[in-house]
Amino acid sequence: MSDCVFCKIITGELDTKFEKETENLVVFRDIHPQAPLHLLIVPKKHYQDITEVENQVWQEIKDVAILIARSKGLTGFRIVNNAGDSAAIKHMHVHLLGEISADRAV
C-alpha cells in the first residue's frame, strides 16, 4: 500500500535500521517506546491485521520473538498485537516489549 508507513519502511523508502530481517519479516525499534526494549515485528507482505495473516507467518513471528528474547538475555517479555480499530497503523505487527516488570499494567 503506497500510504502505509510500514510498507515504506520495508521497501527502504523510509530509512530504518532493522534489528533482524528474514524472508517474511522485518524487526525494528518502535519510535515511541513503551518499554526499555520495544521492537516491532512486521510482516513484509501487507496484511491489515491478524485476521488476515497466514499461519506460517504467525508461527515465524513467534519464533523470531523467542529468538530475539533469548539473544538479548531477556528473562521475560510481552508480545502485543492490536487489530481492527485498536491498531494505530493498519499493517499487521507485533510489539515485543522487554525489560518490564510483571506488575506493569498492560
Image (cartoon, rainbow, N blue to C red):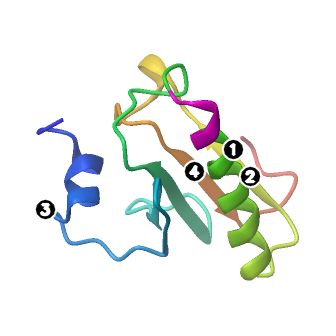
- Image point (72%, 57%), residue name: 63
Per the model, the C-alpha gap separating discs 4 and 3 is: 22 Å
Q: Which residue is mark 1?
A: 59
Per the model, the C-alpha gap separating discs 4 and 1 is: 15 Å
Q: Which numbered circle lies on residue 5?
A: none
Task: Categorize mark 4 by other alpha carbons within 10 Å: few (<14), some (14-19), many (20+).
Answer: many
Q: Which numbered circle lies on residue 95?
A: 4
Secondary structure of the residue carrying numbered label 2 = strand
Q: Are marks 4 and 2 in contact (CB under 8 Å)?
A: yes
Indicate the amino acid at tag 2.
Arg
Which of the two labelled residues, at mark 4 and mark 2, occupies the earlier sequence position?
2
Residue 80 locus on image (x, y percent): 64, 42
**Which residue is more in the foreground, 1 or 29?**
1
63 lies left or right of 36: right
Indicate the amino acid at tag 4.
His
Question: Which callout, 2 or 1, points to the residue nearer the camera?
Answer: 1
Q: Which residue is mark 3?
A: 13
Question: Which callout, 3 or 1, points to the residue nearer the camera?
Answer: 1
> Is residue 102 visible in the rendered structure shown here?
yes
Q: Are marks 3 and 1 in contact (CB under 8 Å)?
A: no
State which region is magenta.
53-57
Secondary structure of the residue carrying numbered label 3 = loop
- Image point (34%, 31%), residue name: 90
100 lies left or right of 16: right
Residue 101 locus on image (x, y percent): 83, 61
